[in-house]
Image (cartoon, coloured by chain):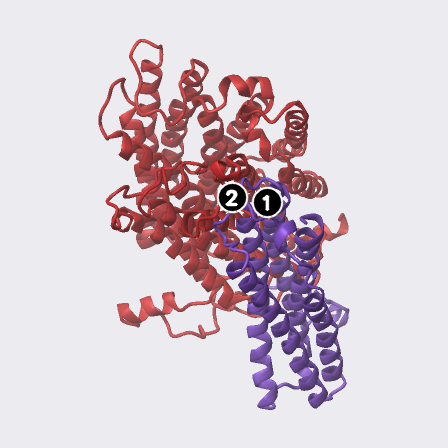
Chain colours: A red, B purple
Amino acid sequence: MSTDSMPWPSTSGASLPAVGRIHEWVTTVDHKRLGIMYILCGLVFLVAGGIEAVVIRLQLIRPHNDFVSPEVFNRMFTMHGTTMIFFAAMPIVFGFANYLMPLMVGARDMAFPRLNAFSFWLTAFGGLLLYFSLVGANGLYGAGNAPDVGWFAYAPLTSQTFSLGHSTDFWILSIMVSGLGSVATAINIIATVLCLRCPGMTLGKMPLFAWLNLIMAGLVVLALSPLTAAQIMLLIDRYLGGHFFDTQAGGSAVMWMHFFWIFGHPEVYILVLPAFAFASEIIPVFSRKPIFGYSVMVAATVAIGFISMSVWAHHMFTIGMGPGLNTFFVFSTMVIAVPTGIKIFNWLATMWGGKIQFKAPMLFCLGFLFQFLIAGLTGIMLGCAPFDWQLGNSYFVVAHFHYVIVGGILFTTFAAIYYWFPKLTGRSYNETLGRLHFWLFLIGFHLTFTFMHIPGLLGMPRRIYTYEPGRGWDTWNLIVTVGVFFQTAGVLVLLMNLFWSYLRGPSAGSDPWDAWTLEWSTASPPPAYNFAEIPRVRSRRPLWDLKHPDDPDWRYE
Amino acid sequence: MTPVHGLQPASASRVATEEWNLPSRGRVGMFGLIAAESSIFTIFVVAYLFYIGKSVSGPGPREVLSVPVFYTLCLLSSSLTIHLALRALRAGKARAFSAWWFTTISLGAGFLFGTATEWHRLIYQDGLTISTNLFGTTYYSLVGLHGFHVVVGLLMLSLVMTFSVLGWVRTEHVERLDVLSLYWHFVDAVWVVVFTVVYIIGR
């Protein structure tokens, strides 16, 4: 059953003219091409959001700076947050889920291929809509040319009175459009995992990647929809004269906060569960050991899924919810640390006694483990309501969640890009450049986000345009901004590595890491039909069984 | 390097004859959609409940709302007729299927007509619009969101009706229509919640 001896069903890409090739990509319903487009789309927006971050940091490099105007500064942090969450992080994790899920469960495509293409284009055009606000939001009013209400857009900033023009509408619509796409993708992922697994792959034999993305998809379905509902309400308020969040007419600004964070906190887990998924695939392969405590990992994932739906109001301790609600949300926030801690111990136990190979993907996963632990610890600090009253909305909070999103999610995303690059392109990346990227980014990350805790503790509020000298914040802000240059350099090295390796890299072969999951059993890049014959599996590591017929895993599971 | 060979192909193995049944993707997909929609409705219902009695000006629900018993019965009984339609199709009775399916559409359209007359009365007699007060905002949003789902459902049902009239609907399509009927049952079930919240608790 040689897969590469069979011809591609579609016309060969190389012989077509450029227009024909673009047409093939635009009209494709192949999960692999859509996955790659998702990832590329996410990387483009990652660069856009990164540029906005650079502008923010340049403005804050010294006191009384006026690199940009206050209005532009507001737009920059709003666009940065919105872009990074909705149009960089989510497309990238969806891209990997799209690309890998059918391959890992031994299927030929996602459950609904055309819906899949539809979702991708919704996400891509949602992102374009957000950036179109730069030129389109002026409208007739001449006020505002990008959203400037902050990424959580608290009422009443979003009311017609305070947000003239259409910038806020572009923000609402872009997130709604991409949100519909995300929910459709999530349903697609759920249906793929539940309905298309190859024979023998029971739920208990799925790779952890499939489990974690299944729970992630469930969270998207349940938690992203409230945001859509809240956006509909906001549109009703803005365009039909409704009063949902209009306190003058009995409405409630606090309701918006609840609705937003009912989405907002599970969103953290929507992004971090795929990060866990990457780590759970990469750490075992580079430790040359099976994952430690598979069933406990699955149980912890399901527990995180449930508990993450009931912690949202720890974002709202400072608004005065009263002792009852505060106590509940402090408690639930402490509880969710337990399954997350279990996962960290399991990854450590997987490495324990293993023959660890310090390749770029593993280096990024190690960085993730260390940084995610610290992010969890500052999370516990902020989860205590009295501590949060002191430091809510300070740079300490900004440092905390960037530790999660950059130190946790982005680091594992880099690991995933390196780990699956040979599968996606058929070529090996340059290991030296990969390590250079790691060290540049690690140094930059810690300069920026470790030192960012300190001005927060010294009382520097987030979203501040500039500050007075002599408050003890100056040096720290300088260090924080210097770190950004290291991170930028790291990302440039990554992009160079990707381009160069895609064009000139040596051929990688189908299984460069000697890995164990099904995606490595087919050619790199896989043919359009993935598997010439649908495989049949008997254990969690089907390729191990294949390579070691004398000592297969299924004897022990 | 050539790909790793030797994974047993499913068809070639002895075990392929064993049962390997997974759920139908249509049903799983529809249940996913229903979960997402339930989540949206939950937020609107919570908003409605939270804002009961918080309007700073009239008119309020007690003065203007009356319980739409007849139209509610229309919508709820359409769940029964769509079930009967699919039972007829499963038994191969295409004409009975068409008849029941048409009844379902009529009942759904009747419900929409009821909503339309109610809104007409509220707007032109009682002067309640979506921007009048908080009650108007929450009422039209929640009932309107549900009505929107009824419209979408009716469009899909009508599409099937067209196919049925053209003679294209056969017994082998029953599984797909089952998936569609799940959506219709969901729309009905949501009305039970909306009805309870708007006309019983909220009045």
Q: Position of residue A8 (x, y in %)?
A: 44, 72
Quick check: can you spot residue A173? Answer: yes
Q: Relative to the observer, which residue lies in front, A3 or A193?
A: A193
Instruction: Tell me the quarter of the picture where residue A105 sits.
Output: bottom right
* Residue picked out by circle 2: A244
Q: Position of residue A349 (x, y in %)?
A: 65, 32
Q: Residue drawn 63% across and 40% down?
A: A309
Q: Position of residue A397 (x, y in %)?
A: 48, 25
Circle 1 Cα neighbour tier, 10 Å, few/some/many (<14 / 14–19 / ≥20) = many
Circle 2 Cα neighbour tier, 10 Å, few/some/many (<14 / 14–19 / ≥20) = many
Cα distance in 3D space between marks 1 and 2: 8 Å
Q: Residue drawn 53% across and 42% down?
A: B57
Residue type at mark 2 is Phe
Instruction: Tell me the quarter of the picture where residue A485 sits.
Output: top left
Q: Quadrant of the N terminus of chain A?
A: bottom right
Q: Are marks 1 and 2 on the same chain?
A: no
* Residue picked out by circle 1: B47
Q: Is residue B151 above or below residue B53?
A: below
Q: Relative to the observer, which residue lies in front, A508 or A447?
A: A447
